[in-house]
Image (cartoon, rainbow, N blue to C red):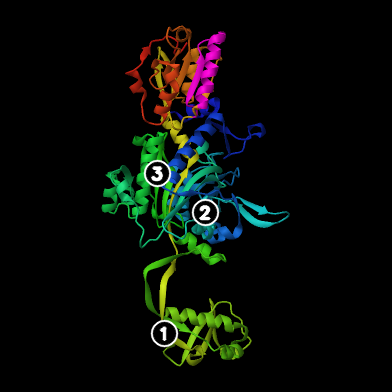
């Protein structure tokens, strides 16, 4: 297990990530990914895209990161996207209140679920102090703080807008057009990988909690009455679950089960969520997460997002703490319904029946010649309200009069208005004027609002997890060695190529040509002729390069063919391979068709004393 300080130091020294804007004192919550980190991050994104876009048959889009204010009024983020803020009266520093409790009280892991009032109580009960200056925080108010970054679109005051707090809204807003690309056929999935922004109260723990981060999200649109996930594909996948029931139990434990059993036992109530947990389990294992330090935890009711009917997090253990690295939410029809209500477009799909249906429909055909003089400017709203009432309560038209309510209506005839209500005005209409009837209609289908299932992955947190879980130390040639045991698929560099010494032109020429040949074969190569061979090995070990290829004099002096040594990172074992075989053998390993151990049965091992010199 890596010490956080040691990992942070390695990340900065080797170019994985470091605080941004350090020349100007730094900016909390913003990080720059260096050459190694950017390559690792790209590889994680590529592996995610390959699994959740290509293998699952989905489509990918790229939407703007700035969106106008009405989008977030509809989505609920303006009113419900908050964290709990407490400010120190002495030094003025702001802190996230629930995190203060989690750091100070061992048996509280998810203080966010407690709510503002109970968080204030816990701060008083435990006499919590300001981490910055030590002043007492008991009695200080805890307030909701909206996490979105506000901006203006256009010159001057412009149009109010916000940096997106999640990539999902870019998919939901474009649903009316995206459904056309899917030919209106459910289910279909849309993915997106890109930046999101949250104005965190107290960024901390490196790239784990930041203000700008990358999300990889899939929005799966389904017909909740007809579409079922391919559970057979993942039913035997073994998972570690931490459901709400176990979290509430003082003696609660993890449940070790399979996806199929979890659905059968109603531990996971949504088959779609269960399906994506199974897919994610396999993907995390594939990219190198330590599955002994991994779990799926169900959200408590108080911590679920406003849109989620149920939510599970993928969590990894980092430095003795569990962090969320992905969320799996059943969002229902919340998002599409809200955008349909607030916009001028249709966020539904037409579901065609297998056979046409004859149905009875209650309808009205109001006499506008009577409604107009009686209700004036409100006549059209009254007619619409009559139709809505006919559909929802046909029995209301059984009497001589019918009463409807019109929101924010205006009328130039006060005699027909019966009373005011908090929601609008009520109007009384003669039933004969409403012209109510029940008619038989033939329908070929209906418009439905799809439900959404969302797997949402934090790319930066996944990168940090992979680095922390891959961090290893051992002894080679009686010296301590630090290395990152990264999966070849996501390691920043595939192969490093060295001439054994840097003052031999023949070795340098062969090594340079070999590096070019491997690059031409699609292999990521680092060429290094600086310093001793031992130091070069150390540098590559610390950035997780799976293989080092060394060109030495023995390989050039062979009678039959030129050979090189290939050193495997984790074991530090070396084999001698013909240059002619090298690219094909490495490609087979990277494609998963072969392991390094297979090569040991076919090529000679090389014993050397230059591993750490």
In the picture, the quarter occupied by the N terminus is top left
Q: Residue at the location (64% across, 86% down)?
A: 412
- Percent coordinates x, y for residue 88 in the rendering: 57, 46
**Residue 512 is covered by the magenta coloring:** yes
SS under mark 3: strand
Please name the residue that numbered disc 2 is placed on.
Answer: 171
Q: Residue at the location (38% across, 61% down)?
A: 224
Work out how far the residue at label 3 is from the one at label 2, CA to CA, in angstroms. Answer: 22 Å
SS under mark 1: strand
**In the picture provided, is 427 more to the left or to the right than 2?**
right
Work out how far the residue at label 2 is from the one at label 1, CA to CA, in angstroms. Answer: 40 Å
Please name the residue that numbered disc 3 is placed on.
Answer: 314
Q: Earlier in the sequence, mark 3 or mark 2?
A: 2
Chain part drawn in magenta: 492-520
- Percent coordinates x, y for residue 184 in the rendering: 46, 60
SS under mark 2: helix
Q: Are marks 1 and 3 in contact (CB under 8 Å)?
A: no
Please name the residue that numbered disc 1 is placed on.
Answer: 438
Q: Residue at the location (31% across, 43% down)?
A: 239
Task: Give above or below for 590 relative to 201.
Answer: above
């Amino acid at each position: 297990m890596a010490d956080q300080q040691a990992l942070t130091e390695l990340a900065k020294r080797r170019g994985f990530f470091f605080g941004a804007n350090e020349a100007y004192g730094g900016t909390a919550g913003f990080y720059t990914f260096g050459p190694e980190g950017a390559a690792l991050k790209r590889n994680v994104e590529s592996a995610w895209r390959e699994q959740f876009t290509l293998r699952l048959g989905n489509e990918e889009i790229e939407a703007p990161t700035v969106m106008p204010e009405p989008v977030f009024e509809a989505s609920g983020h303006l009113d419900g996207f908050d964290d709990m803020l407490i400010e120190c009266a002495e030094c003025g520093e702001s802190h996230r209140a629930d995190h203060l409790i989690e750091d100070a009280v061992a048996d509280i892991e998810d203080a966010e679920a407690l709510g503002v009032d109970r968080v204030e109580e816990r701060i008083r009960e435990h006499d919590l102090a300001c981490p910055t200056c030590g002043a007492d925080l008991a009695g200080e108010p805890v307030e909701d703080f909206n996490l979105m970054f506000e901006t203006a679109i256009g010159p001057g005051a412009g149009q109010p807008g916000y940096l997106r707090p999640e990539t999902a809204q870019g998919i939901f807003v474009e649903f009316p057009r995206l459904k056309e690309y899917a030919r209106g056929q459910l289910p279909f999935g849309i993915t997106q990988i890109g930046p999101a922004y949250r104005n965190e109260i107290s960024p901390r723990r490196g790239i784990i909690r930041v203000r700008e981060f990358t999300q990889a999200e899939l929005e799966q649109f389904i017909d909740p009455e007809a579409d079922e996930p391919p559970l057979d594909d993942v039913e035997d996948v073994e998972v570690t679950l931490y459901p709400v029931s176990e979290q509430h139990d003082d003696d609660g434990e993890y449940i070790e089960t399979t996806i199929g059993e979890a659905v059968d036992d109603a531990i996971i109530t949504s088959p779609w969520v269960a399906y994506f947990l199974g897919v994610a389990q396999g993907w995390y294992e594939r990219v190198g997460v330590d599955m002994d330090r991994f779990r799926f935890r169900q959200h408590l009711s108080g911590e679920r997002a406003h849109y989620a009917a149920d939510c599970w997090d993928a969590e990894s253990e980092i430095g003795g703490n569990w962090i969320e690295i992905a969320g799996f939410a059943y969002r229902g029809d919340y998002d599409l319904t809200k955008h349909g209500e607030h916009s001028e477009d249709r966020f539904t799909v037409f579901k065609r029946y297998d056979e046409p249906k004859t149905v009875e429909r209650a309808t009205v055909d109001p006499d506008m010649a009577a409604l107009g003089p009686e209700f004036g400017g409100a006549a059209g709203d009254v007619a619409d309200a009559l139709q809505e009432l006919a559909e929802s309560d046909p029995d209301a038209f059984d009497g001589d009069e019918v009463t409807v309510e019109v929101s924010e209506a205006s009328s130039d005839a006060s005699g027909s208005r019966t009373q005011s209500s908090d929601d609008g005005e009520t109007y009384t209409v003669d039933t004969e004027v409403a012209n109510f009837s029940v008619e038989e209609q033939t329908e070929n289908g209906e418009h439905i609002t799809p439900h959404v299932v969302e797997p949402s992955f934090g790319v930066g947190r996944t990168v940090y997890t992979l680095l922390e879980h891959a961090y290893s130390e051992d002894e080679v040639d009686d010296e301590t060695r630090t290395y990152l045991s990264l999966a070849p698929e996501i390691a920043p560099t595939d192969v490093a190529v060295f001439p054994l010494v840097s003052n031999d032109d023949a070795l340098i020429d062969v090594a340079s040509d070999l590096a070019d040949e491997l690059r031409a074969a699609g292999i990521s190569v680092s060429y290094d002729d600086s310093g001793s061979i031992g130091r070069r090995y150390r540098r590559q070990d610390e950035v997780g390069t799976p293989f080092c290829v060394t060109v030495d004099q023995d390989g050039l002096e062979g009678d039959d063919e030129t050979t090189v040594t290939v050193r495997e990172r984790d074991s530090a074992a070396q084999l001698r391979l013909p240059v002619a075989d090298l690219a094909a053998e490495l490609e087979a390993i990277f494609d998963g068709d072969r392991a390094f151990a297979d090569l040991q049965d076919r090529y000679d091992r090389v014993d050397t004393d230059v591993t750490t010199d």
